Amino acid sequence: MARTITVGLDGSAESLAAAEWAAREAKLRGLPVKLVHVWQPVPERMAQASLLGAETHQYWTERIPREAAEGLRLRHPGVEVSTEQRTGTRSDVLAEAARDAELLVIGSRALSGLGGFLVGSVGQGVVARTEVPVVLVRAGEQSADEHAMDPAGVPSAATAFRPVVLGLAAGSPDEAVVAFAFEEARHRDTELHVLQAWNQSPYSVYTMGSGFEPHEEFAREKAAVLTEALRAWRQKYPDVEVVEVSRPGSAAGLLIDASRDASLVVVGRRVRRNPFGAHIGAVTHAVLHHATSPVAVVAHD
């Protein structure tokens, strides 16, 4: 597999934001970027029209990736940028292109007034079918958004990165998801916040007023499970500062709240190969639609 960061490009604001994010990530990793532009040939009736013929359409479809690549090279010197044009259905083409990539980056429109994502059928289809990590970047995402404010409270790309946030089911952590999150924190030289959500102890209602606090004991047990799950990873990445957060409540809600102060949120997606199609899971689905930072979805068995 080629060590390339591949971007789905269609000329929209969200895809251009994804390309910018990919270039910044490429510089951190020392990898090249490939812009994959998907387009459909002009129908015969349109090709015969005087205002929008096949040649005019081809000119504009070639111009989009060329100008995007030229801009990335100017703004990110030292990052190798290539382009590729393919025809077909966007979700099919991008899922195919991801097979030759280390990371796939696609854009999502920002929800007006809510600051989250609007992940359409193409984005969801690509995430559900792709077995390499997929990063979704919302329209309007800027480099400064991933960094802490400067001392004057002004957004700046010159300050330290905000933390990377990992959502983890500590009882059954997947190595691919955890490794990806640690690597992203290491690349950014920033903290890794590992979040675990859990439901209240089922026995709490029966012991109210007895003087025994099963909630506190249950919370300590859950926190201990998280600490143990991360022990070997802390040893493997001694330079990454890890902050453990174990709280009752909704996993999706906890991650969405944490995304407001994160440079990247990392979640997992279990690969399910069945005749009824692929799924991304309820928590990942909610995070994709409502997180305010870029979101990385890492597939695992």
Image: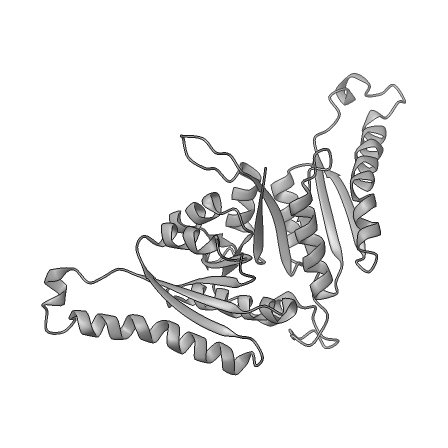
Count of numbered tags: 0
Q: Using the image, determine if residue 74 lies above or below residue 248.
A: below
Q: Using the image, determine if residue 207 lies above or below residue 235.
A: above
Q: Quadrant of residue 65?
A: bottom left
Percent of width and height locating residue 194: 73, 48
Q: Quadrant of the N terminus?
A: bottom right
Of 266 and 58, which appears nearest the observer? Answer: 58
Percent of width and height locating residue 94: 41, 55
Whether residue 71 can be seen here: yes
The residue sitting at the front extreme is 1
- Identify the image's colour scheme: rainbow, by chain, secondary structure or one colour: one colour
Of 29 and 100, which appears nearest the observer? Answer: 100
Percent of width and height locating residue 228: 82, 39
For image coordinates 80% across by 35% down, the residue present is: 225
For image coordinates 53% across by 75% down, the residue present is: 80
Q: Is 185 on the left or on the right of 223, as rendered?
A: left
Of 130 and 297, which appears nearest the observer? Answer: 130
Q: Is 263 on the left or on the right of 35, as rendered?
A: right
Q: Quadrant of residue 28?
A: bottom right
Q: Is 140 on the left or on the right of 258, as rendered?
A: left
The residue sitting at the top extreme is 206
For image coordinates 44% across by 75% down, the residue present is: 69
Whether residue 167 can be seen here: no
